[in-house]
Amino acid sequence: MQPAHPCTGTAAGVPYLALPPTSVDVEADGPARLIVAWHGFEPPRSEAAFAAAVPMTGVPAWRVYLGLPLFGGRLPAGGAGELRALAQHDYLVDLYGPIVEQAAAELPEVVAELRVDLGLAETPIGLVGFSAGGGAALLALASGEVPVDAAALIAPIVVPARALAGLERRSGGTYAWTDESRAVAARLDFNARAAEVVASNPALMLLAGGADDLVPPGDLAGFRNLLLAAGGSAVEAATFRMGHALAAEPGITAHPPIAEAVSVDGALTEFFLEHYADHFAVRRRRPEDGPAELEETAPWPEQAPTVPIPSARPVVPTRQAGSWTSAAPTLSATISR
């Protein structure tokens, strides 16, 4: 039987925080769906912090936030210092590449165990990925090992070499390329793998920050065009007034979401609601149905991190011709052109 309250656990050795279907004005006809989400290297940097930033409370599906390898409860013995050492030694070969590839490789077993833990049917899943987690989601889509029918990617690392250039600008340093690091970058270059990403034609949403120095909106504009040219028929885009991060530093524990995260959460919620309404017979509660009857549920387990209720005022996106653009006048150029 499905637990009816937020819960934490591990699936195939991967820590997770699971939020149950909670919407009261939308209900699913049939089995509950599963949306799996990965955080990034930038804030939010843990499953709990990511769940707090974008809880997607209005989506009648299980939202399960996974911890990336070497982050959160999976920190190496040397802690954050060891992570910094890995990044300084070879960011692509020792840190980014192994984490993204391991996260994607873990997904099939993780999903299989989650279906047992949460009592879910074997239906296609939804994916959400932020930054490096977006790279893991793209790799999972390209591999096709787990059926995915909808994915929302928040500032995903589409081309590692370009993200590295942004890190170089931040730090003032220079990355020393090797044959090995070029091979990692080539494997995780999703501009080159666009056809694999859309091979099963999932619904896709690309979300960018207008001031993002690691994944500029123009990069996602080009990626969207490649996905459409490769046969993707449902690729939407959004630009928000934000940089790369979706939470304040250090982004490890759950805190009330910042305004940028609230805006992104609204776009994610609407995207999945529209997708489910089109494909999975989810209906909005009608006035004649009367008020929703809420089941009495068990309290959160003591070890479960608190996910705050969003309170910040969002920047409301406006949809235009299959894409989104922020209502903020400073973001008149969208990434869908």
Image (cartoon, rainbow, N blue to C red):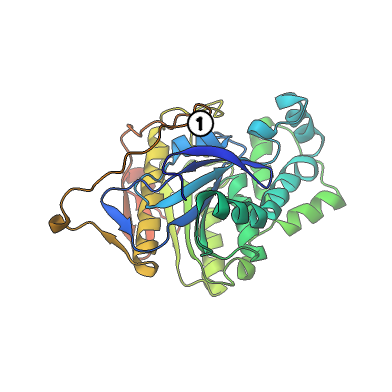
Q: Where is residue 337 in the image (x, y as percent from the top left)?
A: 44, 62
On screen, residue 219 above or below 240: below
Assign a secondary structure to mark 1. Answer: loop
Q: Where is residue 10 in the image (x, y as percent from the top left)?
A: 62, 41
**Residue picked out by circle 1:** 304
Report whether 206 appears left or right of 164: left
Q: Looking at the picture, tell me which residue is in the foreground, 300 or 102.
A: 300
Q: Which residue is drawn at 58% across and 34% down?
A: 45
Q: Which residue is drawn at 55% across and 49% down?
A: 117
Amino acid of disc 1: Ala
Label 1 crowd (10 A; few <14 / some 14-19 / many >=20):
some
Q: Do we see residue 245 in this rendering?
A: no
Q: Looking at the picture, tell me which residue is in the foreground, 274 or 31.
A: 31
Q: Position of residue 99 (x, y in %)?
A: 71, 45
Q: Do we see residue 44 in this rendering?
A: yes
Q: Write down the quadrant of residue 131 in the picture.
A: top right
Q: Residue at x 65, y 36 (%)?
A: 169
On screen, residue 118 above or below 279: above
Q: Where is residue 51 in the image (x, y as percent from the top left)?
A: 48, 38
On screen, residue 49 above or below 284: above
